[in-house]
Image: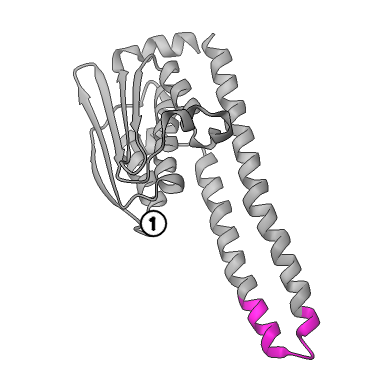
């Protein structure tokens, strides 16, 4: 059953990546090709217009490169043995907020991944999806990311002061870009619990609790 859920989770993620590449990078590149063709028409009669078009192409290409770089970062396998979960989360936060668009309040307790890479990869992907939502959809200026190890549980609290959403909107399949289904599936695979609350204009809170003593059970079910 867990194997089936994982396959469904991976298929959902694959479709989303294909959609993002098609809707952003490929369409932007096609538009840039059109702009280059336009510049070539102006290059003799109106060099200033041609130069302006080429400057726009340069800026557009920079944006496409950033989009592709972000996709590669999100797909790249994580080496938790080298970094550990805490350093991986910190690295993810730095990457997503490289432009300092929002202020993050961060506290992270580390969890050993030496014997259970599967656990850490699944948990990392869940957190990654939550943080991507803040970057892509929330329009937040402040965020809160605390990971606390309490007894045999790992508690993750993620909040933002962004525009929020209604739960009806989040459950609508047309709004699947919120990635909540992927987040819920990942938490379920780890036998954890998740509570999501949000309201228009009042930000979003995601509260996740994962049992740490389930490492061996997770491996057994995989």
Q: Which residue is mark 1?
A: 98
Query: Is 190 above or below relative to 179?
Result: above
Query: Is 158 above or below relative to 194?
Result: below
* Residue shown at 45% from the left, 36% from the top: 129
* Residue shown at 50% from the left, 13% from the top: 222
> Residue 49 at x, y = what percent?
68, 85
* The magenta stretch spans residue 32: no
> Residue 96 at x, y = what percent?
41, 49
- Location of residue 156 (image quadrant): top left
Around disc 1, counting alpha carbons within 10 Å, would you say few (fewer than 14), some (14 to 19), or many (20 or more)?
Answer: few
* The magenta stretch spans residue 41: yes
The magenta segment is 40-55
- Location of residue 63 (image quadrant): bottom right
* Residue shown at 54% from the left, 40% from the top: 75
* Residue shown at 62% from the left, 27% from the top: 11
User: Relative to the observer, which residue lies in front, 122 or 85?
Assistant: 122
Residue at the left extreme?
A: 151
> Residue 41 at x, y = what percent?
80, 81
Quadrant location of the N terminus in the rendered image: top right
**On the rendered structure, is 5 left or right of 190?**
right
Disc 1 on helix, strand or loop?
A: loop
Query: Is 61 above or below relative to 44?
Result: above
């Amino acid at each position: 059953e867990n194997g089936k859920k994982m396959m469904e989770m991976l298929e959902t993620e694959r479709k989303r990546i294909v959609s993002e590449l098609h809707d952003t990078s490929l369409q932007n590149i096609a538009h840039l090709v059109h702009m280059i063709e336009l510049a070539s028409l102006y290059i003799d009669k109106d060099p200033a217009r041609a130069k302006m078009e080429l400057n726009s192409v340069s800026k557009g290409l920079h944006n496409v490169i950033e989009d592709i770089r972000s996709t590669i970062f999100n797909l790249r396998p994580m080496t938790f043995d080298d970094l550990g979960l805490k350093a991986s989360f910190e690295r993810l936060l730095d990457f997503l907020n490289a432009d300092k668009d929002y202020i993050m309040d961060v506290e992270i307790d580390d969890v050993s991944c030496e014997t259970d890479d599967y656990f850490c990869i699944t948990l990392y992907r869940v957190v990654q999806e939550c943080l991507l939502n803040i970057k892509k959809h929330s329009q937040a200026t402040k965020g809160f990311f605390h990971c606390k190890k309490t007894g045999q549980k790992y508690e993750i609290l993620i909040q933002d002061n962004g525009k929020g959403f209604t739960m009806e909107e989040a459950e609508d399949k047309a709004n699947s870009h919120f990635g909540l289904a992927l987040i819920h599936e990942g938490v379920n695979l780890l036998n954890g619990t998740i509570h999501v609350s949000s309201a228009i204009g009042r930000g979003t809170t995601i509260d996740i609790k994962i049992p740490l003593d389930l490492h061996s059970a997770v491996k057994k079910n995989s």
